[in-house]
Image: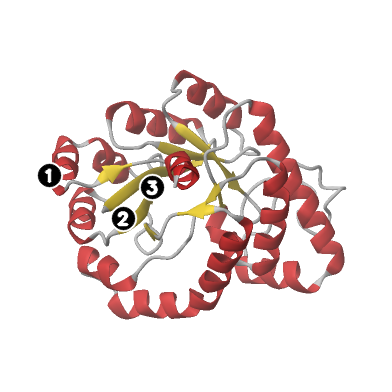
Amino acid sequence: MKELIVTGDDFGLSQSVNEAVEKAHRQGLLNGASLMVGAKAATDAVERARRCPSLKIGLHLVLVDGSSILPSQMIPDLVNRRGEFAPHLVRAGFNFFFRPGVKRQLEAEIRAQFEAFRETGLPLDHVNTHHHMHLHPTVSGFLLKVGREYGMRAMRLPYEPPLPSWRASRDGLLRKVGACLLLSPWVSLLKKRFKRAGVCSNDFVFGMNDSGRLHLDLMLRFFKFLPPGVAEIYFHPGNDANELEALIHPAVQRALLASQIRTISFTDLVKHREVH
């Protein structure tokens, strides 16, 4: 069986992103969105989510390239004076791993973002991270620890199988294989941690290697080459008009029906596991 979760990331980043997410849900395939609780348009995003109760909302945890919830004086090793995380992923990763003081601040900020999500009153459908930083073992350890306290039951597994991805996009085979090999130890560790913690996840994700380029034709080819199991395709519909078109175009709706792919949410995954 092939099942598909369709998610919009960066919900709350800007009003234009929020508008695109709402439109993609009301008129298209988008059934989930990942909320950046510290972003400037987060309040607007929450209001839209409340108007769309069928849109499943998750937490898009931000620890790099974004704004913190805690004030800068509480986490001075994570953010600058304006409360902005560093945009350099590798440098941040070394910082998280090797500095004990940073680890304490990291856990505090993760907890603050979960608390901010709880205060919205929205049910927590899933959790993922900006730039997939939960592949970092320090981040995933704290995330699973804190998330358990806030009812987290499902997370994104950032694993994009290179061959189906290449067959759909017809581009970048070596790049996609190389990225898969580079990330494979961290993906394997994350799978093991999910299993121990009882956290549900997708089997595959699409959008990592073609972020910003998920146009209509590529979306249709993804349906054709989707592996059996639970796949998630995530979009940034407010950043690219082609991504929004791919989500709302009638041809995509028809292709999904013809392919007999069942659309689900992370909440559905959790319920299925509880039944079985």
Badge 3 amino acid? Phe
Residue depicted at 51% across the width and 52% down the height: 200
Few, some or many C-alpha atoms within 10 Å of disc 1 (few <14, some 14-19, many ≥20)? few
For the residue labelled by badge 3, is the local secondary structure a helix, a strand or a loop? strand
139 left or right of 261 in image: right
- x then y, percent, for residue 148: 68, 47
Tell me how far mark 1 sits from mark 2, CA to CA: 24 Å
Which of the numbered marks, if any, corresponds to residue 213? 2
Tell me how far mark 3 sits from mark 1, CA to CA: 22 Å
Q: Is residue 83 visible?
A: no
Few, some or many C-alpha atoms within 10 Å of disc 2 (few <14, some 14-19, many ≥20)? some
Tell me how far mark 2 sits from mark 3, CA to CA: 9 Å
Badge 2 amino acid? Arg
Pointers 1 and 2 in contact (CB under 8 A)?
no
Q: Which residue is mark 1?
A: 258
The first of marks 2 and 3 along the sequence is 2
Pointers 3 and 1 in contact (CB under 8 A)?
no
74 left or right of 117 in image: right
Which of the numbered marks, if any, corresponds to residue 241? none
Nearest to the eye among marks 3 and 1: give it: 1
Nearest to the eye among marks 1 and 2: give it: 1
For the residue labelled by badge 2, is the local secondary structure a helix, a strand or a loop? loop
The first of marks 1 and 2 along the sequence is 2
The first of marks 3 and 1 along the sequence is 3
Instruction: Give whichever of 259, 67 is nearer the camera.
Output: 259
Query: Quarter holding the N terminus?
Result: bottom left
Few, some or many C-alpha atoms within 10 Å of disc 3 (few <14, some 14-19, many ≥20)? many
Which of the numbered marks, if any, corresponds to residue 235? 3
- x then y, percent, for residue 195: 56, 61
Badge 1 amino acid? Ala
